[in-house]
Amino acid sequence: MGLIAMSERDLQRIEILLKVIDGRMTLVSAAHVLDLSTRQVRRLLERISTGGAASIRHKAIGRPSNNRISDGVRDYAVTLVRERYADFGPTLVAEKLAERDGLRVSRETLRTWMVDAGLWLSRKQRRTFHQPRLRREAYGELVQIDGSEHRWFEDRGDPCSLLVFVDDATGRLMQLRFVRSESAFSYFEALALYLKHHGAPVAFYSDKHSVFRVAKKDAKGGQGMTQFGRALSELNIEILCANSSQAKGRVERMNRTLQDRLVKELRLAGICDMETGNAFLPGFMEYYNQRFAIVPARSEDLHRPMNLAPERLQEILCKREQRYVGAQLTFSFERQRIMLEETEVTRGLAGRYVETYAYADGRLDVRWKGHSLPYTTFDKDQRVTHAAITGQADERIIAHRVDAFCWS
């Protein structure tokens, strides 16, 4: 006689029913323990008396489920995953099979199939641990920012950096921007887009990248802060620097998610350059936020509207430094020699400091107490002949004599 497979529930029922048969438990007590009606308990007792304990076994044991997906569908799905989505997670696979292949399978079913096929590791096998941290309560209260250098276009394009802005309270992607590298100008560009679409948050939370934090306490030219920090100060936005990558875990985990999900979306869309990628990002952010953003603890939006004129915002989002003017009304800037044109204002600037405004498009504005000063640029690496030097000296002498004659 073969072995009869029984579930834990069936074994418990038999044990209770035998107690009723032996008189060690009442019918009502058995019904209460088994969470059945007294009529159902009587039927089970009748079944035991006629067919024995084996008749209590559930009829569906050993039989395939009526809702079971056919082996052909499973094999087809696993083949698609292996050929097209081998490095996708179950959630993303379920989305793409439905969107692109017309095959609707739950992510948990796909997870089981992928684990069985060796295409996915279970959570226990991956064993990832995250340090928990309470979210901020309101939207716009704290926005985590970071840059992620990666081969975003895989072998189809050059590696670049993705600037990522994530709201701490909701997990919403607020701003994504492909740039060549992390720099003050690239963050200025992303910040301008952020302010245009959302307004000014209460604070930004970053790492200790040189764009955000001055390593030397006695740094000159910026009052002890970076260009980005100075701009945020003028916009009345606080900047907080994390002491470790774990402290800004939300944006770090977002970077890993994007390096997985966004890379595959770019691959499926056939995108291979930053310009096309930046045009693709707004739609990706909208889709991602609809699926994964959460509701904050408090409903208010703490972003402040930016009512600055475009010219004023441009003056804030630029590189501003102070430069010492020499006796010849010249100063150095980015391997160039800047010579101020001699005017009534500039004559008295020798030995003083002027302020330079460098913009992302290459323009340079030199100012003294808010007034723009005319100047000429000379490349320091450019070789200057003796004749040119003599000619410039003669011109300055003649101009000085004419000026003296006019004043006499």
Image (cartoon, rainbow, N blue to C red):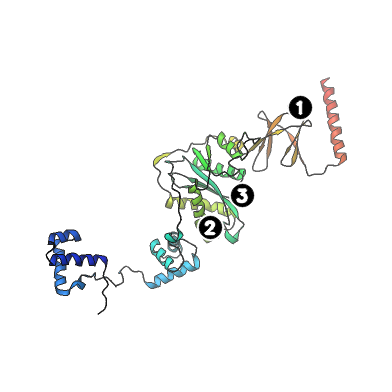
Q: Residue at x 85, y 37 (%)?
A: 389
Quarter where residue 43 is shown: bottom left
Disc number lying in front (3 or 1): 3
Q: Amino acid at mark 2?
A: Val
The quadrant of the picture occupied by the C terminus is top right
Label 3: how many Cα within 10 Å (few below 14, some 14–19, many 20+): some
Is 373 displayed left or right of 171 in the figure? right
Residue 35 can be seen in this image: no
Nearer-the-camera pick, 148 or 98: 148
Q: Residue at x 83, y 23 (%)?
A: 404
Nearer-the-camera pick, 302 or 345: 302
Is 380 displayed left or right of 202 in the figure? right
**Where is residue 168 drawn, in percent x and y?**
46, 44
Q: CA distance from mark 1 to mark 2?
A: 58 Å
Is 248 displayed left or right of 332 in the figure? left
Q: Considering only order in the chain, which callout, 1 or 3, is on the residue closer to the N terminus? A: 3
Q: Considering only order in the chain, which callout, 2 or 1, is on the residue closer to the N terminus? A: 2
Residue at the spot of label 1: 347
Residue at the spot of label 3: 181
Tell me, yes or no, whether the two marked residues, 1 and 2, touch with CB atoms within 8 Å: no
Going by the picture, which residue comes out furthest to the bottom? 1
Q: Amino acid at mark 3?
A: Ser
Query: Which mark, residue 263?
Result: 2
Q: Considering only order in the chain, which callout, 2 or 3, is on the residue closer to the N terminus? A: 3
Label 1: how many Cα within 10 Å (few below 14, some 14–19, many 20+): few
Say which element carries label 3. loop
**Where is residue 173 drawn, in percent x and y?**
48, 48
Q: Residue at x 24, y 65 (%)?
A: 9
Q: Amino acid at mark 1?
A: Arg
User: In the image, is residue 377 above or below residue 397?
Assistant: below
Say which element carries label 2. helix
The quadrant of the picture occupied by the N terminus is bottom left
